[in-house]
Amino acid sequence: MAATALLLCGPAHASAEDGKAQREKTVKCVNAEMEKENTARKGKDGHLTDVQLKALQRIVDDEVMKGPLKKPSNDEQKKVLKRIEDAAKKDKDLKDLPMATIDKILVELKEKGAYCEDQN
C-alpha cells in the first residue's frame, strides 16, 4: 500500500490545478489499494478494523494532497513516511496499533503508491 506515489514519485510536469486533480486520482487509487490489501489480511496479522483503516487513509490522504509536484528525493520520501508514521502514533484510532503493523503497511503503501502513480 505503502499511497504514496505522489509523495514518493510525484509528477514533475503538472500545473497546480492538474496537480490537484492528479493528487485526487492518486488518493482514490491508494485508498482502493489499501482496502484491497486490508481485506486480503482479514483474519491475519496486520488486519485493520474499519475505523483504523479510515484513520490511516485520512492521514495518507492528507500527505498525498500536500505532496510535491516533483519527484522527491530519497530523503524526502523518508520524511513523508516518517510524518505518516508519527501521525499514526498520535491518532486516537491508531494509538493501540503495534508499530510493526504500521511499518508493514507503510512498506506496502510505498509499493501501492508507485502502482497508483503509474495508473495516472
Image (tube, helix red, strand yellow):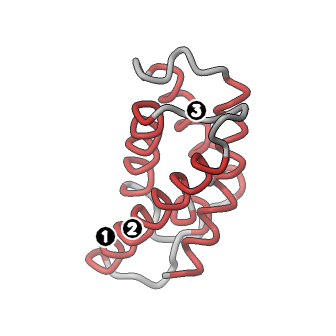
Say which residue label 2 marks: 23
- The residue located at (55%, 14%) in the rendering is 96
What secondary structure is marked by label 3? Answer: helix
**Compared with residue 113, is residue 99 higher up or lower down, i.e. above or below?**
above
Amino acid residing under circle 3: Glu
Say which residue label 1 marks: 20
Where is residue 42? Give x, y as percent.
62, 40
Q: Quadrant of residue 117?
A: bottom right
CA gap, disc 2 and disc 1: 5 Å
Say which residue label 3 marks: 85
Q: Quadrant of residue 71?
A: bottom right
In contact (CB < 8 Å): disc 2 and disc 1: yes
Where is residue 40? Give x, y as percent.
65, 50
* Label 1, residues with CA under 10 Å away: few <14, some 14-19, many ≥20: some
Kindly identify which numbered label has been placed on residue 58.
none
CA gap, disc 3 and disc 1: 24 Å
> Of residues 12 and 47, which is closer to you in this image?
47
Amino acid residing under circle 2: Arg
**Among numbered discs 3 and 1, the one appearing first in the sequence:** 1
Q: 64 left or right of 4?
A: left
* Label 2, residues with CA under 10 Å away: few <14, some 14-19, many ≥20: many
CA gap, disc 2 and disc 3: 20 Å
- The residue located at (39%, 67%) in the rendering is 23
Q: Quadrant of the N terminus?
A: bottom right
**Compared with residue 57, is residue 43 higher up or lower down, i.e. above or below?**
above
- The residue located at (40%, 51%) in the rendering is 61
Report the residue that reaches farthest toward the left.
17
What secondary structure is marked by label 2? Answer: helix
**Compared with residue 3, is residue 104 higher up or lower down, i.e. above or below?**
above
Where is residue 118? Give x, y as percent.
59, 80
What secondary structure is marked by label 1? Answer: helix
**Among numbered discs 2 and 3, the one appearing first in the sequence:** 2
